[in-house]
Image: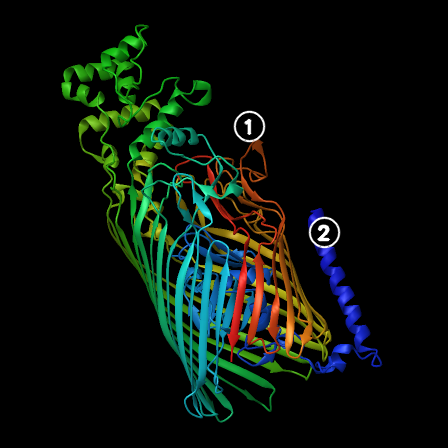
Amino acid sequence: MLKFRLLAATALTVAITATAHAQTVQTDPGQASDSVASGSVAQDDFSSASDIVVTATRRNESVQDVPIAITAIGAELLDNAGVVDIRGLEQLAPSLQTTTGQSAATGSSLFIRGIGTAGDNPGFEPAVGVFIDGVFRARAGVALAELPELERIEILRGPQGTLFGRNTSAGALSVVTAQPQFDLGGYVEGTYGNFDAIELRGGVTGPVSDTLALRVDGGYRKRDGYIRDANSDRAINNIDRYYVRGQALYDSGNITFRLIGDYYETDEECCGAVSVVRGPTAGAIQAIAGAQGLVGLYTGAPSDRIQAISPNRGFGERVRDYGVSGELNADIGDLKFTSISAYRDWRAIRDQDIDFSGIDRAYREDYTNELRNITQELRLQGSAFEGKLDFLIGGFYLNERNKLRDTVRVGNDANRFVDFVLSGALAAPPTAGGIGQAAQFFGSFNVPTFAQLAASLQGGPALPAGTVPLFSQLLLAQSEQLQAAAAANPALGAYLNSPLPGAQAGQGNTNDYRIDTDAFAIFTHNIVNITDQLSLTLGARWNYERKTLDATINNNLGSCGTFFTADPRAAILRDAIQTASPQLFANLFLLSCNPAVNTEFNGIYNDERTDSQITGTAKLAYKVTPNVLAYAGYDRGFKSGGYNMDQASFDSRVLGGDGPQATDLEFDKETVDAFEVGLKTSITRQFTFNLAGFYQKFRGLQSLIFSGNNFVVQNVPRATSKGIEAEAVVQPVRELIFRMGYTYLDASYDESNNFAGTPLDGQEGEQFLNQPKNVVTIAGTWTPRISGDLNALFHVDMRYNSEVNIACPTTEQRPGACEPRFVNGQPTTIRNPGYALVNARVGIQTEDRSKSLEFFVENLTNQFYYITGFAVPEQTGTFAGYPGFPRFYGVRARAGF
């Protein structure tokens, strides 16, 4: 906390000092600087860094005149900060957070004000919408591609729906790329850095005629991985990708048409997770791996960024993304008509070592997700009543086809894992939950004869070295009823003295899901100018969505057979195990026939759901002075329900459920009532300061939550996000700019929730995981004149996140379960203490920035932190974390004309 106060105090001191200096310069006209005398732009002639024209309200306005909490970042700052994709925006926008989990393509999430849609499940739609040149990108992973040359990025905080085609419940990112120009121009750019990083980018634009201009951009980027494998010399989390993008712009004055086509492809290894907390199953994993000369779980410092991976498994991830869009703008008298049509096709194919260890327990192979989107947006806007009313009406249509082929397989160590885990648990003394005798089920160890076991239990010779009895043999030895039945039925005796049928390597599932979505919306956004100073904004939106689910589930796991076969011998054994220990029976079932590959769920499932919702906005804005805007508003947001594309959501009759049904995959809609007050000030050209306070009440918050053995969907009845946001831009002189931001966030589950019997039990009133309460961002850029039109460049940006809990035991359902504790010197949770990430860039550039040479470093202090983390399935008490980037550095050169 002291570190945070020092950072906040430093930011405030910089702002006050710089503002004071700016006022001194401005109020002392007799003090002409050398730079002005030498021909640089005079103090009153430059454009402030805060003078950014945005289209957040679909009207060209200064960001300071828009009664919306919005962060607008121009092309120059984006370039100086080295932002190449949306993840890089975190350094400049404190209320935005990006996370990448199991996959960069399908496991990425965006959060604004603590609200997002986390989880590696393509059935979830984003709470934060991403729009690139007005076109909605269906998932966060789809939007995290390389960005071409940019004009600006607008980050709108809070629900959006009356302005953007696709409604969003938490916020929106509007990415505006550079258009074709009617003057010939181009650039080429190259970067080289550590981890053998290479990047090449280039583009050219120019006119074909007085009304038609073209533009082509392309790029290639590669970098070696930074997470090393404990069992080989390979490294994962690398980069290998390219893109090409073409545009045509027709402009006849009152009609413009912009056509964009792009293609993007990656072939990478992602995403590795390091072992942070090791639970009671760790010993079994280490023993299985050790017998094969491998490391099961790397026990060194997580900051080593070393993960134990099965030698025959990988993290390959191949993405192909392409699309075409056309935007038509036409002036029809005093009206403006806009049409945005788009087609996008995205596909990700990936492999994954899903046990996150060096043993070959389970993996994914050629997991394939495909998204095809067709969108159409229409808008008509204008003014009436002599400018007293600015109106906008619009419609939006989305047709989405979401296909998933999930392929979970078991590996060579599947049966050994079950036997090692359960034999260790059974060998524990009764006071620790065991029986004091190791036992197995699938014959991973040598099996003694029944006579040898009976003799050892009656005080005779010990069991032969290296042998472990079957649990069925123990039951037989201790049950006169079973002995009598076995004597009468030799086949039963043979069955109880034989290992259970196990899983064969490569068995698992091939599940096909398809969700078709048709979404319709009609919206309006109107500004009533009551006086020159006072305006009222009223907007409304009607949403209708229909989703249809078609799923084919096909599992062939051999170790499930014992639980579903009609063989009377298996029925006798099932009853005997359940009578002896219901908990052991449940654990054996969940490990042998994990819900992700349970053959009980085989079948074809179909379902359909619809959502209809009216949302809207109301805002009152008052210009206190020409440079001070105060506003207050209310927004109603909505995100439709859907289907969890994961068979683990089904109920099993074996554990008392009602069996698999299509509705088990369904989750409900999410709504939010958001209130906001704000103040935007441009005290001088050298200083702007904006303040916003927000209160957002969510109902049915869609959450993907770990239940101990698998992930389930839970609509949280009530959750609240509230806080304060402050942003300032200080520009004492033309060449020196500071941009600062601060967010205080209280995002938590309401105490009134009753989570009893759910994976969130005990989390009532707790802050959301991985959401810091305090975030500070500072970016400073100084471009002093060297000579002629050559400037130096000094840029530093910093983001400070206060401490957060990332993952905590689900077995400790109590308030404070996530608080940091240590058992035998080992942490029981994953958390980040407060930390700062610092990036820097130094170089030279021409006045128009067409030519430059820069040296850069990202994560200057090599700060270690976790992007996110999770409880590892089937490994009770074991947690893994996705480590953040190490220090990257290099040189970049650019030449343009």
Could you tell me residue 13's position as x and y percent? 76, 60
Question: Could you say whether the residue bearing mark 1 is in a helix, strand or loop?
Answer: loop
Q: How is the image coloured?
A: rainbow
* Residue type pointed to by label 1: Asn
Q: Which mark is residue 5?
A: 2
Which label's residue is closer to the chain start, 1 or 2? 2
The extreme top residue here reads 460
* Residue type pointed to by label 2: Arg
Instruction: State whether residue 668 appears in this view.
Output: yes
State whether residue 168 is above or below residue 361.
below
Per the image, the residue denoted by label 1 is: 824
Q: Which mark is residue 60?
A: none
Could you tell me residue 149's position as x and y percent? 49, 73
Q: Nearer the viewer, residue 261 or 769?
A: 261
Q: Residue at x 46, y 47 (%)?
A: 227
Q: Is residue 587 left or right of residue 771?
A: left
Instruction: State whether residue 167 appears in this view.
Output: no
Q: CA distance from mark 1 to mark 2?
A: 33 Å
State whether residue 12 is above or below residue 453.
below
Question: Could you say whether the residue bearing mark 2 is in a helix, strand or loop?
Answer: helix
Report crowding for label 2: few under 14, some 14 to 19, many 20 or more residues within 10 A (C-alpha): few
Could you tell me residue 122's position as x and y percent? 38, 56
- Location of residue 574 (image quadrant): top left
Q: Residue at x 55, y 81 (%)?
A: 59
